[in-house]
């Protein structure tokens, strides 16, 4: 090895050290939190009630095997194909949702029992039984919602600059689909059929299309090549697309017939009427943090846009709307939040953004936040049903 090569390798090693240290710290914190949660659930639901043998041993084994499944699942997702991962991913993801409700129930009951001053073995057993029963009911409710699949939701929006010639224009938005370990080709085909039935003039895919690499999922996403609309199919990348390799997926969606909008815009013109509007799209902010692009650069996306034209912005993260409203965007379409996915997690989402689900207005600008078309993590949706959103646009009277 030459002296120059040695020097280059030393520089590379120094560059890698902070990332390795950061990864080690992240994993230490993650495993610590995961262990603490499962220890707490073991105490409240298994040890405190002092269940007789062999049920206490069964309960303890169940808790820690479930914890192990959460550790193994991301490893399997990155090394196996989705259908090979399914046998581990399904119970692990189901446990993720159950764990959330068990944790909320145990924590809430702790607070109530402390205020009431109630204690003792009978109380501990009654509390454990109630928390588990409530969790099972909510898990069943959430799985039933997912099994029904996304529904078509029509939203009528009036825009001051919208062309009268395009009154009733239909933009069909799909978002947060998460094709991956749990959702496969069949689900993609189901979405395509719903989009086709909605008779779109334009289709907007607002991020988180996948959870996994192109090589793992190219067969699973193949049905999206059937998406059609008279003014095209457009795509912006979400944070999970960046985690999965946004640059690779950007090339793949082009093969599928979609047009990616990465901090840029197009002028959509109707051949029959000559009426036109601007469709812009920005990357997810995650891209900048991962060194893949500039993040949600609204200024670049809108550069050169005519002032008299209506502007529709596709942005995965609704937090981009503050920039978009300041720039005078007429309507932003976003996802990312899943509407909370598992009530009452929507209240936690509200701590990060005030735009959780539905239509909002700031000054002359509006944003529609989809609850998402698929799901991430737990195969459940509680009071946050999946949707294929149909935005019907009208000029403001």
Image (tube, rainbow, N blue to C red):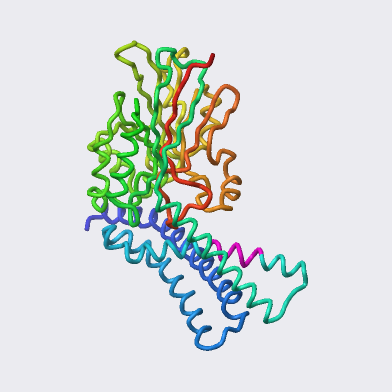
Q: Could you tell whether 198 is left or right of 32 in the image?
A: left
Quarter of the image for the N terminus: give it: bottom left
How far across and down, in percent of the image, does residue 23 sit? 44, 60
Q: Which residues are magenta?
A: 99-108
- Which of the two residues, 140 or 41, is positioned nearer the viewer here? 140
Quarter of the image for the C terminus: give it: top right
Which quadrant holds residue 143?
Answer: bottom left
Residue at 66% x, 63% y is: 108
- Which of the two residues, 80 or 130, is positioned nearer the viewer here? 130
Q: Is residue 133 above or below residue 374?
A: below
Judged by its main secondary structure, the magenta piece is helix
- Which of the two residues, 119 or 298, is positioned nearer the viewer here? 119
How far across and down, in percent of the image, does residue 33 sit? 54, 66
The count of marks equals 0
How far across and down, in percent of the image, does residue 88 sit? 35, 66
Residue at 50% x, 50% y is: 341
Residue 103 included in the magenta stretch of the image: yes
Residue 244 included in the magenta stretch of the image: no
How far across and down, in percent of the image, does residue 117 sit? 77, 72
Residue at 50% x, 33% y is: 368
Which quadrant holds residue 313?
Answer: top left
Q: As drawn, which residue projects farthest toward the bottom?
A: 53
């Amino acid at each position: 090895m030459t002296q120059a090569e040695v020097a280059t390798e030393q520089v590379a090693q120094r560059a890698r050290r902070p990332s390795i240290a950061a990864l080690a710290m992240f994993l230490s914190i993650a495993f610590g939190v995961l262990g603490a949660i499962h220890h707490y659930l073991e105490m409240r639901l298994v040890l405190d009630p002092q269940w007789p043998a062999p049920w206490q041993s069964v309960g303890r084994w169940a808790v820690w095997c479930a914890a192990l499944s959460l550790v193994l699942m991301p490893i399997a997702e990155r090394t196996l194909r989705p259908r090979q991962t399914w046998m581990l991913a399904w119970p692990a993801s189901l446990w993720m949702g159950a764990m959330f409700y068990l944790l909320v129930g145990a924590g809430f009951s702790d607070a109530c029992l402390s205020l009431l001053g109630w204690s003792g073995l009978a109380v501990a057993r009654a509390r454990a039984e109630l928390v588990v029963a409530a969790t099972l009911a909510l898990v069943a409710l959430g799985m039933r919602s997912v099994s029904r699949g996304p529904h078509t939701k029509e939203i009528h929006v009036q825009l001051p600059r919208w062309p009268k010639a395009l009154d009733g224009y239909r933009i069909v938005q799909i978002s947060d689909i998460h094709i991956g370990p749990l959702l496969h080709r069949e689900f993609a085909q189901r979405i395509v059929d719903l989009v086709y039935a909605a008779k779109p003039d334009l289709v907007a895919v607002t991020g988180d299309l996948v959870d996994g690499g192109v090589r793992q999922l190219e067969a699973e996403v193949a049905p999206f090549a059937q998406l059609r609309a008279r003014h095209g199919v457009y795509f912006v990348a979400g944070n999970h697309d960046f985690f999965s390799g946004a640059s690779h997926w950007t090339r793949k969606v082009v093969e599928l017939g979609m047009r990616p909008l990465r901090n840029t815009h197009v002028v959509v013109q109707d051949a029959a009427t000559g009426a036109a509007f601007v469709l812009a799209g920005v990357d997810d902010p995650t891209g900048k943090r991962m060194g893949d692009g500039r993040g949600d650069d609204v200024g670049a996306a809108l550069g050169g846009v005519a002032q008299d034209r209506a502007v529709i912005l596709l942005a995965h993260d609704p937090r981009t709307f503050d920039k978009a409203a300041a720039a005078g965007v007429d309507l932003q379409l976003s996802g990312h939040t899943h509407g909370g996915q598992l009530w009452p997690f929507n209240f936690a989402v509200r701590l990060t953004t005030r735009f959780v689900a539905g239509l909002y207005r700031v000054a002359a600008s509006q944003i529609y936040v989809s609850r998402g078309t698929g799901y991430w993590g737990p195969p459940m949706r509680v009071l946050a049903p999946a949707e294929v959103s149909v935005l019907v646009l009208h000029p403001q009277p």
